Amino acid sequence: MTGAMYAAIAGLKTHMSKMNVTGHNIANDNTNGYKNQRTVFKDAMYTMYSNGSNGTEVVGGKNPSQIGYGSQVSSIDLNMSTGTYAPGNPMDCMISGDGFFMVGDKDVADVIDPLDPTSLKTLKLTRVGDMDFRADGYLVDGSGGVIYGFLAVGVDEMTGDPIMSDQLVPIRLPRIEQAVINTDTGVEIELAADEEPPDDVAWEYRNVVRYPVANTFDEDGTTVTGNIRLRDYWAAEQLDENGSPQADAVNNLAFANLDSISIDTASGRISGITKDTDQQITIGFL
């Protein structure tokens, strides 16, 4: 009788665990990004009641007799299948299938090393895609965490395709700067800081997208090759006498004001159209 009671109690405890998991699923029915769980049972250990035997020339073999001690929880699994999608704003995303968004603080990029996978532990993984660009230009989630991905650092002049950085960095809007444009060719006329536009060509001021430069500089202002990191430097010329980036020169450039920002469902490409010039640009990739 004692063994029967223990077996029954073990079953009750196991079903209580399943009820707890079910209650947790019900409580999070409207939680964004929640993945429901399921409880898998298995039978508990057995005690031998009588041993089995091999058959003889006259009789067949006798199977062993065992008495079990009830059931127990084998595992509590996550259901990672794609759920329903109810976007609240145009930048909301949902992952279809496996995968996570990577979220972290702004300064985490300084410690991420592409050659050291353990450095990625500084980032958090989430399935919740409530994203939006904020006033400081960063793409963040509802909790203020910065979304990480790969930024565009320019445009290929031959193909028009974006040139992407291979460093994992916070997604941020490019900046806009007024530049002198040759109206006949549409090409920017590069001028020194105190140089006036030329008189012998037709030109006008236009807003031009300035992408971040994928360079890192040492103490002398020399570009360091090898493990290239993407810094928040928007022009290589914006260095002071000691070779350090001029923060004021960077901050004086406004972020691009974009319409119709969208995220491609197949590639994770984030793009938008500039309000002033109706130019379609690529911001980066998730």
Image: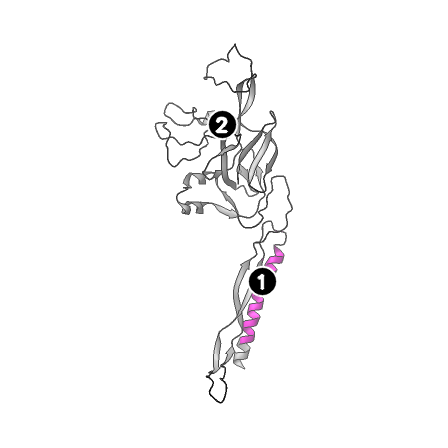
Q: Nearer the viewer, residue 207 or 198?
A: 198
* Residue in the picture at 55% in, 41% down: 268
In the image, farthest residue toward the left: 220
- Residue 233 placement (x, y as % from top left): 45, 29
Tell me which numbered mark, 1 or 2, is placed earlier along the sequence: 1
Q: Nearer the viewer, residue 181 or 88?
A: 181
Q: Secondary structure at mark 1?
A: helix
Q: Nearer the viewer, residue 28 or 48?
A: 48
- Do the CB atoms of the residues marked 1 and 2 lie less than 8 Å apart? no
> Is residue 12 found inside the magenta-colored segment of the image?
yes
> Is residue 22 found inside the magenta-colored segment of the image?
yes
In the image, farthest residue toward the top: 199
- Residue type beneath disc 2: Asn
- Residue type beneath disc 1: Asn
| Range of magenta residues | 7-36
Q: Is residue 284 left or right of residue 28?
A: left
Q: Is residue 26 left or right of residue 182?
A: right
On screen, residue 283 above or below 33 = above
- Residue 21 placement (x, y as % from top left): 58, 61
What mark, if any, has residue 20 been given in the picture? 1
On screen, residue 66 above or below 197 = below
Task: Give the CA distance from mark 1 to mark 2.
Answer: 52 Å
- Residue 239 placement (x, y as % from top left): 41, 25
Residue where numbered disc 2 is placed: 251
Picture quarter with the N terminus? bottom right
In the image, farthest residue toward the front: 57
The image quarter containing residue 134 is: top right
* Residue in the picture at 51% in, 48% down: 125
Q: Residues within 10 Å of mark 2 (few under 14, many from 20)?
A: few
- Residue 126 placement (x, y as % from top left): 53, 48
Q: Secondary structure at mark 2?
A: helix
Instruction: Give the prevailing secondary structure in the magenta stretch.
Output: helix
